[in-house]
Image (cartoon, rainbow, N blue to C red):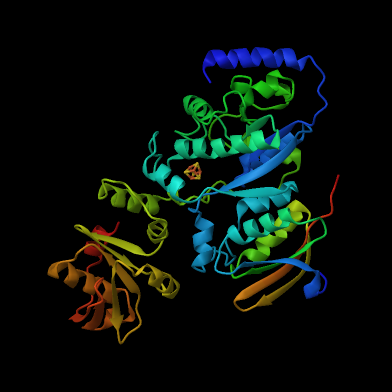
Amino acid sequence: MGERPSDGDIACVVDASGLFCPMPIARLSAALKELSPGAIVELISTDPGTPGDLTAFCKAARHTLIATRVEPERFTAWVQKKERTT
Amino acid sequence: MTDSDVTATKARALDAATKVDKKPVRAIGLLSGGLDSMLAHAVIRAQGIEVRAVNFYTGLCIVETQRRLGRRRRDGSIPANEALGAAANLEMEMEFIDISGPDYLHLITHPRYGYGANANPCVDCRIFMFKKAKALMEAWGASFVFTGEVLGQRPKSQRRDTLRIVERDSGLTGRLVRPLSAKLLEPTIPELEGLLDRERLFDFRGRSRASQMALAKELGLTDYPQPAGGCCYLTDESFGRRFHDLMARRPERNLAEEEVLLLAMGRHFRLGEVKLIVARNETESVAFRRFIGGRHAVEAIGVNGPLALVEGAPDEEARRWISAIVARYGQGRVQARVRVEWRDVTGAVELREVAPHDDEAVLASLRI
Ligand code: SF4
């Protein structure tokens, strides 16, 4: 995994604090849908299961998990939307 | 659609099948995360069909509440979202469709086809989901919807007649494919149209998972969840008891979203028309605070103990019982007397001193 992208590279922030499975991923997925390929979304979650869900989600949808930050009560991740496959 | 409409549609479909159509064939798949739905997706994709996998969020998900309350599995791990895990194993994108809210709550309190073993109105629930899937199918230009249902696997919702009812009432007659049992069911429109090769579908039936496990092996699917569990509170026995207890006292059968959360938490006791809900731990006590409005709040003071909520209008005798029960679940249970504070719906505060309840058999008889 790489570095946290700079603020200017983040297209959108999904703050899912206080929401639990599957909502953080559902909100992230909805946000990515609206963006162009290659766009980066910052996800903030307080659900302890989000790291595992996010790994599965990125593997399934082929998005790139660029970086994560784990704090005691909060998890932040930066996800880059997959490039068009067709 | 009537049966004769279906026959006509199928006949037209057969005619159409003779023409060459180069458009990609698309389908909407319902991915619950269990082995059967994974297999159904693998089988349909193996026929070159473009699949959009969806998972319905009902707001009654066990994993969601477990995570909210910080619960862990027996092995210490965080409860996982099985549908996401399945999508990852299949390496396919999956969409969550949020169907939670008043319409879904109305469905579970007024099911046309009744309940399964607990509070699960699976037939109505599936009709509701499949109607949404049908709308997605039409919007996406897909030809059919499919699920991992297996004929005879569940006593009520997967009987032949019920499968037909679900197909009919969701408006998907002829366009709802169950790939794992397809050969035991009437050919569907995509099969008749030649979009789907019936010979490459299956004839699984009943509760045994042997055929599914053999197929999983053949398809190289090794990582799938065990059948136990599921993610729906409505199939949970104790949730079901609490749900029916509540509905039995509510002729209008209405249910608010917050009540669903409360049905899933704490220890529940029934004392006539009064209900007592005692938090099981610190996390639940914290979660209970947001439900205090409209309820009496009771907790021991001077010792650690759970927050309890009381619904209804407790008389003096009920207040004594409740105070003793609340005292029993805190650290004061070993003391001769415990002070208990009542904060009434009106905001009035009352202090009581009681001996903690010590008759487990009586307590058990009051449990919902
Ligand atoms: S188990 Fe729950 S989510 Fe599944 S069909 Fe039954 S009621 Fe609906």
Residue B32, by quadrant, is: top right
Side of B213 where B125 appears, left or right: left
* Vertical arrangement, residue B50 with respect to residue B61, above or below: above
* Vertical arrangement, residue A22 with respect to residue B31, above or below: below
Q: Residue at x 66, y 53 (%)?
A: B84
Q: How many marks?
A: 0
Q: Residue at x 19, y 80 (%)?
A: B352
Q: Position of residue B176 (x, y in %)?
A: 60, 29
Give the residue at the far bottom of this rendering. B302
Give the residue at the far right of this rendering. A86
* Vertical arrangement, residue B211 with respect to residue B38, above or below: above
Q: Toward the viewer: B102 or B241?
A: B102
Q: Toward the viewer: B29 or B251?
A: B251
Q: Position of residue B247 (x, y in %)?
A: 30, 48
Residue A66, by quadrant, is: bottom right
Residue B263, by quadrant, is: bottom left
Side of B162 where A49 appears, left or right: right
**Residue B277 in view in this figure:** yes
Q: Position of residue B197 (x, y in %)?
A: 74, 24
Side of B63 where B116 appears, left or right: left
Q: Position of residue B195 (x, y in %)?
A: 74, 24
**Residue B223 in view in this figure:** no
Side of B166 where B142 appears, left or right: right
